[in-house]
Image: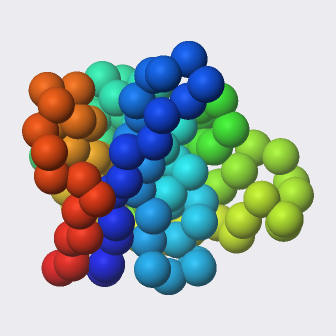
Amino acid sequence: MKRNYIVKVNNNSQKFLLVKFDSSSCQSLSSFLNSEVHNFYTHIYKELEAVVTGQKEASEFGGNILNIDIGKEETELYYQMDDESLGEPCFIPTNELYKLVLEWKEMEDKMYRGEDIFPLMVED
């Protein structure tokens, strides 16, 4: 899955990280990482880890704009509002989402440390 990490600056001169996927079917995944993981990383990480390691069979989380239903094999990410213009639900293997959440946090930490690596394209 090919993705691009970029750093933007808002009107208050605050930097923030965005990840964009090449596939248009990943719009809700991009929004999830950019919004929910940014705001609720610790909680999301713990819930994903509990399912990936077998401590829980399943879990769910509701953020500001997206919900996730975490299953042992697959996780669904979907917008809370039933509005198709926001994006389609995304189904992703749970272990892959877990790795993406860890990667996103690592990239955000690099941004805050001022590492000059952005924009950065990652593909696996």
107 above or below 111?
below
The one of 99 and 56 positioned closer to us in this rendering: 99
- Coordinates of residue 42 in the picture (x, y in percent): 30, 23
Q: Is residue 35 visible?
A: yes
Q: Residue at x 21, y 78 (%)?
A: 123
Q: Is residue 56 visible?
A: no
- Coordinates of residue 74 in the picture (x, y in percent): 39, 66
- Coordinates of residue 17 in the picture (x, y in percent): 39, 41
Compared across the picture, whether 47 is left or right of 64 comes to left
Q: Quadrant of the C terminus?
A: bottom left
The one of 10 and 88 positioned closer to us in this rendering: 10
**How is colour applied across the structure in the image?**
rainbow
- Coordinates of residue 95 in the picture (x, y in percent): 23, 61
Q: Residue at x 68, y 38 (%)?
A: 65
Q: How many marks?
A: 0
Q: Quadrant of residue 93?
A: bottom left
Q: Residue at x 61, y 25 (%)?
A: 11
91 above or below 12?
below
Compared across the picture, whether 122 is left or right of 21 comes to left
